[in-house]
Amino acid sequence: MSKQRAFANTPAAVARARRFVAHELADAPSEVVEEIEIMVSELATNCVRHTVTDFTVSVERSDREILVEVTDSGGGMPTVRRPEPSEPSGRGLRIVQELADSFGVRELRGSPGKTVWFVVGLDESMGSASGTQSATRDFSQPRSRRGAGGGSRLRGGRPSDNTVTPEARARRDRRRRADSLLRLP
Amino acid sequence: MIRLGSDDEIDDSGASVGSAEVTVDGAGIAVIKLSGEIDMSNVDSLRDVIEPVVQETHDRVDFDLGALAFMDSSGIALLLRVAAKAGSVHLRGPSALVRRMIEATGLSDVLFIDP
């Protein structure tokens, strides 16, 4: 399952983006959806604060993981920051780093902009309610590439990847490269 | 009790709907009960009504988060702005996720989580 939606660059779009992913993940465990809503809210907020164009949110779910991507056409790359308490803002990506099993940023090719993505694993006991969707793609990636410098936690084991399609492998490789774009203070 | 914000289900501006209720408990602590959702679309309006209350009162401000349906880092920013003015800020009834966000961002020494 993969769904994508575009949102106008307005503050109200932040909540709309949350509702979109929550709707698309209605049958996922509620605690996972709540984490994803926070992360989507953080990434959508960054789009609205730092760019002037529309942004898109896509949700893709396999039996084992949920991938969310937020794409905008603004310049600059987001960074994980650790601001002092006297600084009210600047914690969005740090929170994504905490809540996601892995995340990263990749620049768009041929046009300005970037995609910030994150993956949340589903415990095997909570696999897709529609277990017949064996055709869903595996967009998994090695846990050793998780996040940017630790901080997030392992969730469940890493199943073997012997069924990865070429397309999924290409996506994974893109993400491996993208991880290297993350800048840390 | 001072009631701030709005409980309307539909906000014409499309902003998220959150509200704040301010009371003073028996110990003289200002208790601000937040409910609804807090994100970048409504955090400034909430701040505009909360900050004057904080300025004219109390060394310690408690936020009651037990009825809060959603809060992202915009909500944390709101709490930090109040903490910068008040003597101390305590949080009552934060969800496990809010607690995790505060701990992960190293703010446990500024936004005290009451047991």
Image (cartoon, coloured by chain):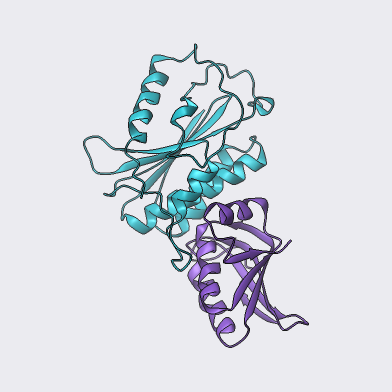
- B12 left or right of B25 in image: left
Residue at figure coordinates x 44%, y 55% from the top left:
A82
Chain painted cyan: A
Chain depicted in purple? B
Seen in the picture, residue B68 relative to A113 is either above or below; the reply is below
At 47% across and 58% down in the image, what residue appears? A12
Which image quarter holds the N terminus of chain B? Answer: bottom right
Asked whether A148 or A121 is in front, the reply is A148
Question: For this rendering, which residue is in front, A68 or A21?
Answer: A68
> Residue extending furthest left?
A110
Q: Residue furthest front?
A: B109
Q: Position of residue A33 (x, y in %)?
A: 60, 42
Task: Work out whether residue A183 can be spotted.
Answer: yes
Q: Is residue B88 above or below residue B13?
A: below
- Give the residue furthest to the right: B26
Q: Is residue B25 above or below residue A72?
A: below
How far from the left and from the top, in percent, is residue A110?
Answer: 21, 36
